[in-house]
Image: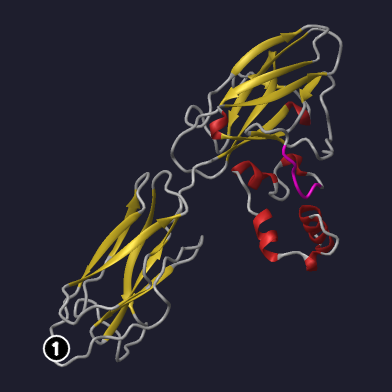
Amino acid sequence: MAQAEVIGLYREILKVTDVAQADINELLQVLQPDSLLERFAYRKRAGVAGGNKEFIKLKGTKGQIDHDGAEVKLEFENELLGFKCLHYSVTESNGTVEVTIVKKVQQDLTFGYRTVADTAVSPKDYSHVDQVVTLKKRETELKVHIPIVDDDEWEPDLDFYIELFDPNQINSETGVPERLKGDDTRCKVTILDEDFPGSLGFEVTDLRVPKNAQKVDVTIMRMEGADGTISCYIRTEGLSEHPTPHGAVEFEDYLPRHERVTFVHGENEKTVSIMLVREKEAGIDQPKLFGEEPGAKQVAEGDEEESAEEVCDVIFKVKLEKPEP
């Protein structure tokens, strides 16, 4: 999106002529979405029907978005019937997605419609439908409802398709009726997950350990949601790749850990203990706390989080890492 378009959008949201004069707190407040649908409504270029439209407007207050605001150029349209919209988005909690099939001629038409799995699969994410119907001469459209499964497990947005077929044209190899020709005889449905799994991070990013401690407890916090089951890896490592005067040594100063930590639905805190094996040394001063102020710190997607742990006069690190997909 060009800079001028962005400024124009801010003017429209804030109802001001000069964005520079707008209050920054007001700007931040109005940009915070109130719902998952509002967040999705401003995703850029969403799906087949995105066209040249930079933003997608909500349609009504249902948990469904029909991406029909853009002018979609089709290379070939079916002459008899097709979908009114080629891309629908629906939240899990909506229960169903409603799609509209438009009849373009004034005559009786018998045809079928069926769902086709993609990243969304039946029956886990939606109910499969395969049905043959007849629209009479005076009927101009048919509204079809596909059940959507609402669960507590967090997932990324998932897609499946609905396509129209001719029940009298059977593929000789598959035995399945052929899809009707035309770019408008197939539409995509995106299921939006409303579950918020949250973010994981250390409660405190710098810890002091007494010289006579046998272990150090590291607390992992789950913030901004606790839906479904999520996990991360916790791993200890040395202060540096090269030996340093203050670098703790595995098995000499602490027992290394590298394991998966799992948070079940509703769980928002975990404590992991790291055993210390350094021998007691008299006369060593209490280690100093340095670095960031204590406080929750989130792990951004694709990033790692580190927490520096001091064992007497030596230091080692603890990291949180995202599991491989």
Highlighted range, magenta: 53-58
Q: Nearer the viewer, residue 223 or 74?
A: 223
Q: Secondary structure at mark 1?
A: loop
Check disc 1 and report the residue beneath it: 281
Please give left or right for residue 30 compared with residue 254 in the image. right
Please give left or right for residue 260 compared with residue 137 in the image. left
The structure residue drawn at horizontal position 57% and vertical position 42%, both measured from the top left corner, is: 157
Please give left or right for residue 12 compared with residue 247 in the image. right
Q: Position of residue 17 (x, y in %)?
A: 86, 60
Quadrant housing the N terminus? bottom right
The structure residue drawn at horizontal position 66% and vertical position 25%, both measured from the top left corner, is: 98
Q: Position of residue 225 (x, y in %)?
A: 45, 50
The structure residue drawn at horizontal position 70% and vertical position 60%, both measured from the top left corner, is: 27
Magenta segment, principal secondary structure? Answer: loop
Residue 243 figure quarter: bottom left
The structure residue drawn at horizontal position 63% and vertical position 49%, both measured from the top left corner, is: 33
Q: Amino acid at mark 1?
A: Glu
Residue 311 among magenta residues:
no
Q: Position of residue 158 (x, y in %)?
A: 57, 39
Q: Position of residue 80 (x, y in %)?
A: 82, 18
